[in-house]
Image: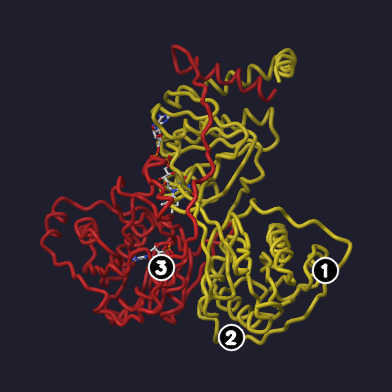
Chain colours: A red, B yellow
Amino acid sequence: MTGIKILVCAKQIPDPEAPMGSAKIDFENKRMDVSALRQVINPYDENAIEAALKIKEESGGEVTVLSLGHNLDSSLLRKALAVGADRLILVEDPRFEDIDTNSIAQALSAAIARIGEFDLVLTGRQAGDWDSGHTGTVLGEMLGIPTINLARSVKTENGHVNVLKIVPGGYEEVRAALPALVTVSNEVGGLRYPSMKMILLSRRRPVETWKGGDLQVTWDDINGRTITELLAPPDLSRKCRFMEGDAPEEKGRNLATILKREFG
Amino acid sequence: MANRCILVCGETRDGILDERTLEMIGAGRELAGKLGVEIAVALLGDDLDGIAEEISFFGADKIYKVVSPSLGTFAPDLWIRALEELCKQIDPQIVLMLHSTTWMDVGPRLAFRLGSETTTDCVGLEIDEKDGLLLKTKPVFGGNALAVFKCEKLPQFVTVRRNVMKPAARLAAQGEIVDFPVNLDPSMLRVESIKTVKEQAVSLEKANVIVAGGRGIGGPEGFKELEDLAESLKQSFDEVMVGCSRPVVDSGWVPADRQIGLSGAMVQPDLYIAVGISGAIQHLVGMARSRTIVAVNTDINSSIFAVADYGVVDDYKRVIPSLKDRWEELCRDGDKDTCLCKANT
Ligand SMILES: Cc1cc2nc3c(=O)[nH]c(=O)nc-3n(C[C@H](O)[C@H](O)[C@H](O)COP(=O)(O)OP(=O)(O)OC[C@H]3O[C@@H](n4cnc5c(N)ncnc54)[C@H](O)[C@@H]3O)c2cc1C
Ligand SMILES: Nc1ncnc2c1ncn2[C@@H]1O[C@H](COP(=O)(O)O)[C@@H](O)[C@H]1O
């Protein structure tokens, strides 16, 4: 087999690892104010890109990264090209802002229909903005292909995908005929670093930009999130008593004494 | 939608019932009371007699035994299909599932097939008095906010976070056990299971004390220091376990079942010692309900100190061994000190 076509769905989100409180709640408009945060590729989608690149290295193939949204930052997503993806497709439309999970899956499946042929679709297990965690499996259902949730390893062989799927207390080795969809967890490993040369080369590579109107989307099926209220989370903060001492060892000993008093 | 029931999906694996199912029944009973509807439990498997009998005393009006030889082990393709049949038959208004790997695999796809959608990882459920629809509270942005969702499509599907709903209590009255045999065509199974491998999995939820290490530990060797400390603490506590943050799992220093946080275990031990962990929100939501929290970190600006009771700003490599040695010392001349501590509390 001369290499397979892999599509990776990657979402651009406000940095989910920014310090607590930097994402502000706009109570009145029931929206998150994330203007203070930098945008990143969702961490689990970086894992998915890494999984695709590993397959490409081992069995050959072509990796296309697909991102959908409003106000996408092509320089950010170009990172995918710099690490070794072959194609980057951005689908942008104001109508894709703040839409619910099923609508995102709907729009992604329309974008995939436009791409045409594919063998394997990879998504992340969860996006760190709305933490919904099911765009992947619902997309698999819409595409009507075998769907495997939570992979810690993905390999392809003879028209099949072999996955180590995370299950309670261990993992399950499963297999499905291609085309198939797999959602990827962090255990596959972090995304490799691009070389300087690849970064420079990727700047000259084309990025394909599509509009919502380029897709066969049933716009009636595209809905906003139906949020009735956005609330502050419970306050987790406590008053911290810092250990004193001239040396770290002394602080450690002081801590032991205090804990021993508290717990006996 | 007057007489549509609430359906709770039972959490079972390989024929064993997970007691968290009672939390779902507890939540379901409350909602059923408010709506004045029946509550049903669905159990899937190849032989469910024991489990069905057991669960029938917890306040459900009906227990559906969805039985087929091919449902004995978990296969999402078949579980989705079987529940699709049940839902078409009984047409529930609300479907409650545990937020677990099982139901995250089944729920969203099942909901889509039935023309609806799922809200995942909910921590609060209410009924909107105006229209009888479910108000679903879910942490978003890692836990930086709580969003209340309301969807008009029926059935209304939710997965519910463990440990937040009150488990249903046992009653004298028994619910009706109903057989619901399903015919599953093998061709529906599109993902083939080759083998399942059990790892020496730990259950962090049971620990009294957790010593958790983060990226700041620097490598697998560093975790030996934490193991040593855990060993010493066992002189004073029943269950002491070593946990970790996500980057530690990504790097392969520690197996994934040790991960604490949004996508790992949610814990609340008596004592949580966070070492070399910065305190990202996705980690905090998994441990901030611990009784006493200690943080050891070189950076005084780390968020972890904001949720800690005791802090040490220094290199763990020098703090942890002395903490351990001193603990052992104190345990040796224990009596005197124990008296002191009792007087203090
Ligand atoms: C959707 C989603 C889900 C997630 N789920 C989880 C989850 O379940 N669990 C989880 O943990 N994370 C989760 N994360 C990741 C999370 O956002 C953080 O990236 C992660 O918790 C950071 O881990 P850390 O604190 O170990 O590493 P870092 O943030 O890198 O912190 C390392 C810390 O070690 C300190 N340090 C360095 N050297 C020393 C030393 N010698 N002695 C003492 N301290 C030292 C540093 O000061 C620093 O504070 C998730 C993220 C997303 C987007
Ligand atoms: N707008 C998007 N563009 C591309 N991929 C997406 C988008 N939204 C979600 N995904 C994919 O779906 C996965 C799960 O997202 P979610 O269900 O939102 O947690 C992500 O990890 C991505 O792989």
User: Which of the chains bears the disc numbered 1?
Assistant: B
Inspect the image, locate mark 3, and give the three-letter code of the amino acid beneath it. Gly
Q: Position of residue B14 (x, y in %)?
A: 68, 67
Q: Quadrant of ligand 2?
A: bottom left
In the picture of the structure, the residue carrying the numbered disc 1 is: B53
**Do the residues at pointers 3 and 1 share their chain?**
no
- Asked if B122 appears above or below B117 in the picture, the reply is above
In the picture of the structure, the residue carrying the numbered disc 2 is: B186
At label 1, counting other C-alpha atoms closer than 10 Å, the crowd grade (few under 14, some 14-19, many 20 or more) is some
In the picture of the structure, the residue carrying the numbered disc 3 is: A224
Who is closer to the viewer here, A202 or B321? Answer: A202
Q: From the viewer's perspective, tell me whether residue B119 is left or right of residue B299.
A: right
Inspect the image, locate mark 2, and give the three-letter code of the amino acid beneath it. Pro
Disc 3 to disc 1, how far (Cα)? 43 Å
Q: Secondary structure at mark 1?
A: helix
- Asked if B31 appears above or below A141 in the picture, the reply is above
User: Which of the chains bears the disc numbered 2?
Assistant: B
Disc 1 to disc 2, how far (Cα)? 29 Å
Who is closer to the viewer here, B63 or A184? Answer: B63
Who is closer to the viewer here, B324 or B84? Answer: B84
Q: Secondary structure at mark 2?
A: helix
Q: Position of residue B227 (x, y in %)?
A: 56, 34
Disc 2 to disc 3, how far (Cα)? 38 Å
Query: Of discs 1 and 2, which sits in the foreground?
Result: 1
Q: From the viewer's perspective, tell me whether residue A142 is left or right of residue B104.
A: left
- Asked if B195 appears above or below B240 in the picture, the reply is below
Q: From the viewer's perspective, tell me whether residue B287 is left or right of residue A81.
A: right
For marks 1 and 2 on the same chain, the one whose residue lies earlier in the sequence: 1
Inspect the image, locate mark 1, and give the three-letter code of the amino acid beneath it. Glu
Number of on-image labels: 3
